Amino acid sequence: MNSSSIEYVDVLIIGAGISGIGAAYYLQTMQPGKTFAILEARDEIGGTWDLFRYPGIRSDSDLHTFSYEFKAWENEKAIASAEAIMAYLRETVAENGIRQSIRFHHKVISAAWSTSAARWLVEIERVDTGEHIAMSCGWFFCASGYYRYDEGFTPEFPGRERFKGQIVHPQHWPQDLDYRGKRVVIIGSGATAVTLVPAMADTAGHVTMLQRSPTYIVPVPSEDRIANTLPKLIGRDRAYAVTRRKNVAKQRLVWRFCQQYPRAARRLIRHLNAKQLPAGYPVDEHFKPAYNPWDQRLCAVPDADMFKAIRNGRASVVTDQIDTFTERGIRLRSGRELEADIIVTATGLNLLAFGGISLSVDGVPVDVPQKVAFKGFLLSDVPNFAYMFGYTNSSWTLKVGLICEHFCRLLAHMDSHGHTTCYPRLPGSTPTRPLLGVTAGYVKRSVDQFPRQGVEGPWRTSMDYRADHKTLREGPVEDDNMCFGTSPADALEPALTA
Ligand SMILES: Cc1cc2nc3c(=O)[nH]c(=O)nc-3n(C[C@H](O)[C@H](O)[C@H](O)COP(=O)(O)OP(=O)(O)OC[C@H]3O[C@@H](n4cnc5c(N)ncnc54)[C@H](O)[C@@H]3O)c2cc1C
């Protein structure tokens, strides 16, 4: 293709999920002179919140921290349905004229940085027509989430083909699935399983959650009384800001309490669980994990809905291992057989770094696991590349705003100094560790595909909003580790070809 016919934008955002839409908002607000586009593989915005269609799909974060700082969450429910989150995102897109910048059905396949041209050449597949097209950009901003959209994770279950009923994965939920009066077994114990149990229990004959090992499950109120009262007293926007600060502080407190006093945290969660369960219930068998609270993400259940379903006999929990699927259900290692009409494999996601996009720098493929995250949004020795990865120990989106602000300040800094390129340069002896610290099985399975992080300073990916606030919102964009170039050729240090 003739390079002059290739469309150029200053910033190309990949993904129109909550992160990509946030990036577009900040760019057009803080850097109105920059051109940008959002490339989205699917035919709708929202990413996660549009993809998953299983019964009861909802957040487990409170929406006062999961929504954007710039747009108040006004719904009475603090723990919100995907539908309510989608309505909020559609409103954000409409209010800020962002939809016109989104190219749907545009799946990014590869991106090649050319130092001599100081830009990325991006290969795109039009998912609707199969056509391949190209675009180029000064900055490549990857807001592609962290997992595969085409396929959820399902382990190999022996005897799976013998089962005569229906097997469903929550990531591919058949919209016409009729589970009225049916016996449903949900395999898993993560956020999806604990959402599905109460959502299906009213209609199904009985729902059994089959888990190999327990997870921490914490009842939380679905509504925030302070958030719902304050607007009448101090106005919507101030009330939202106050609630957000309150919830950030609460999340941090809970996280730190769990980290510093794991035994006390365990006891407290057990107490909360036991209070919700019938007398004599084997709490420890089903609700006492082997790990400490927040070593893996806690599962929140709004208004204790899952415990209610257990209390009223519509749902139960079984902790055991699968021996084999049978014609009628699942035989367990203990010898017990769980009969089922429908088996739901709530067994997780397949993680995927940077939307599976192949990156290269001056013809050399970027070996992502060899790269090190800088300030949690740039990659060592990869020029003009930014990415969005939110918090895993509190609301993902809290980090989106901070990264976007810092990114926009970085662009302003570069403009004011006439720089066209920048990248963080990893000092030779920097010790590194995996980027994703959580010990959940699905993270362990895929952690090697992701970049790494350092152990301190800007090379460490912080999971602490307050620390990030200092670094990203208040801190300088200049850094001893950052290399800036004022013309294409002069940003070229040997590191780029390493
Ligand atoms: C069921 C579920 C519930 C969750 N609940 C919470 C919660 O309560 N709180 C919380 O903090 N986090 C939660 N998370 C994590 C959640 O995914 C994030 O919080 C957030 O929604 C991620 O937004 P995102 O925009 O970064 O990514 P996504 O929502 O994954 O969106 C990424 C977008 O990028 C597009 N894309 C990907 N690759 C390409 C490509 N190559 N080319 C073009 N487009 C591409 C995708 O199609 C998608 O639209 C949940 C996750 C799941 C799966």
Image (cartoon, rainbow, N blue to C red):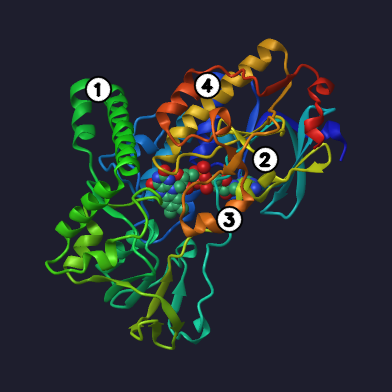
* Displayed quadrant of residue 396: top left
Q: Earlier in the sequence, mark 4 or mark 1?
A: 4
Left or right of 488, for residue 67: left
Q: Is residue 362 above or below residue 268?
A: above
Circle 2: residue type: Lys
83 lies left or right of 11: left
Residue 146, horizontal then vertical, whole percent = 55, 48
Check the image and name the residue furthest to the top.
Answer: 416
C-alpha distance separating marks 4 and 1: 24 Å
Task: Name the residue that disc number 3 marks.
Answer: 446
Mark drawn on residue 29? 4
Label 2 element class: loop
* Disc 1, SS: loop
The residue labelled by disc 2 is 371
Q: Quadrant of residue 252?
A: top left
- Give the distance between the C-alpha atoms of the residues marked 3 and 2, in whole angstroms: 16 Å
Which mark is nearer the camera, 2 or 4? 2
- At a point 60% along the width and 40% down the height, the residue shown is 432
- The amino acid pointed to by label 4 is Thr
Q: Check contact, mark 1 vs mark 3: CB within 8 A.
A: no
* Element class at badge 3: helix
